[in-house]
Image: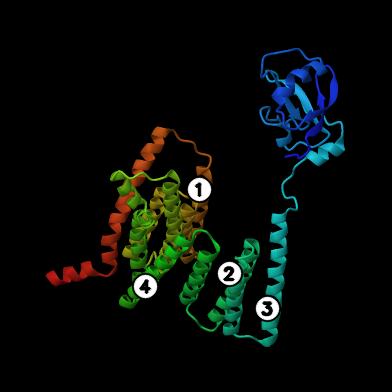
Amino acid sequence: MTIDPFLRISVLGTVRNADLVVPADQPATALLPQLLGLLGEGRGPQGTYTLATALGEPIDMQRPIGELGLHDGTILRLSRETEAPPVPVISDLVDATAEHETTGRWTEVSRGWVLGACSALTMLTALVILLQVRGADALEIGIAAGGLYVISTLCRLLRKDLAWTYFAAAGVLGLWWAWQQFLAGWSPLLILLIWLAVQLAALAIHTPQRFAHLAGLAVLAIATGAWWLIHFLVNDPVRAGAVTATLALLLLGLTPRLALSVAGVFKADDAVGRGAHLALSEVAGRLDRAHQVLSVAVALLALLWALGMSPVAGAATGNVWTLGITIALIVAWTLRGRHFPLATERAAIYGATLAATATVVWSQRETIWAPLAAVGLALILAAVLFVRISDLAGAQLRRAATWLETLAVVATIPVLVGMFNLYSQLLESFR
């Protein structure tokens, strides 16, 4: 908005041009009759004419000219609204260059991110060199990573861009710590658990989705407890993995309702049912919170399912029960992804499916059929992008997928029982 009471503009008409000094507090519609007379244009009904910038962008005729962001010397073109606007013609390259807006310009935002990244990268380089020269162990690397996490948390009070760059630097040192602990003989699952817990706790501080990441910590604790309990009770890793993957599949089906409950959506529904009036913003906030919780929970359950499927898929062809549970779990898990609305949720589910399928292919790498089947699957997935089906065919496919998903979910329990040789033990007991 200009602070001067007058603005100098140049108007190009169809008959003649004019350089004018106009009051900045008047809209273009109020000045239009005098403008038409100066330019020798024919009179028409209100709204017949419009003004556009040199780049062809029409201006708001109802707002005061001083509020349109125009500068002294701006060139405007007069045209009828019923006609196609004339092709913008550039007569002054300097003015066109000054008015041209392009993305990626050096702004205050980009300045903060670039300088923050340089600061964090310099700090990370200095710490890596210092730790390398000292021959630091995993404990010192972990302390350095924790220090960067603390710095990123403190920086969040001042600048978010600086906080995020130091958060990324802390993550790099965290990965170095994880590698050192792996070389020291730590369990990879324990390292992954600690790394995920630290990341979720840090994200709960750095992002507005604090509730979702705190809920993710709770899901991580439950998944970890279930993992260790199952592997404590079941010695065979293949059977334990099958039980873990089945549990993750069942929890995936319960996750949407639990997310809605934790986010308070059901409580809001009960309040509306009792006659209360809730603001639309409050309801939308609860729904957004439910989606955030659901996304984090689905990602963690997908990781749990993939870890459980790893030994099962690796021994898929060992016997008929292992092959059956592998097929049932992959089919049920993949088809269950249809019920989740967000792209991040489906990406996590389908990524876990891809990991399990790749494990099966890798276990059969010495045969010719496994790589060929993987190639065929890749071609089918690519071909799906070019297939367009009718609404009726889509409804029929969804119905068939629902039946197949139900069958696969129901089949997991008896097949899982068969993996523990309970059927053969029952037959032996009746002989």
Q: How far apart are marks 2 and 4 (CA)?
A: 29 Å
How far apart marks 3 and 2 lie (CA) works out to: 18 Å
Q: For the residues carrying marks 1 and 3, which lies nearer the camera in this image?
A: 3
Q: Are marks 1 and 3 in contact (CB under 8 Å)?
A: no
Which amino acid type is shown beneath numbered disc 1? Answer: Leu
List x then y, in percent, for residue 399.
34, 41
Q: Tell me the tag on residue 145.
A: none
| Residue nearer the viewer, 403 or 153 | 153
Q: Nearer the viewer, mark 2 or mark 4?
A: 2
Calculate the distance from the C-alpha at mark 1 to the C-alpha at mark 3. Answer: 45 Å
Few, some or many residues within 10 Å of mark 2 (<14, 14–19, 20+): many
Label 1 element class: helix
Mark 4–mark 1 CB contact (< 8 Å) = no
**Residue 373's x, y, as percent?**
48, 54
Question: What's the residue type where badge 3 is placed?
Answer: Leu
Residue 324, quarter of the rendered image: bottom left
Q: What is the x, y in percent for residue 281?
A: 45, 46
Q: Which residue lies furthest to the front in this view?
A: 5
Q: Is residue 323 visible?
A: no
Residue assigned mark 1: 381
Residue 225, numbered label: 4
Q: What residue type is labelled 2?
A: Thr
- The residue at which mark 2 appears reads as 153
Q: Which is more N-terminal, label 4 or label 2?
A: 2
Q: How far apart are marks 4 and 1 (CA)?
A: 36 Å
> Can you give x and y, in whole percent of width and height, for residue 17 in the image?
85, 22
Tag nearer the camera, 3 or 4: 3
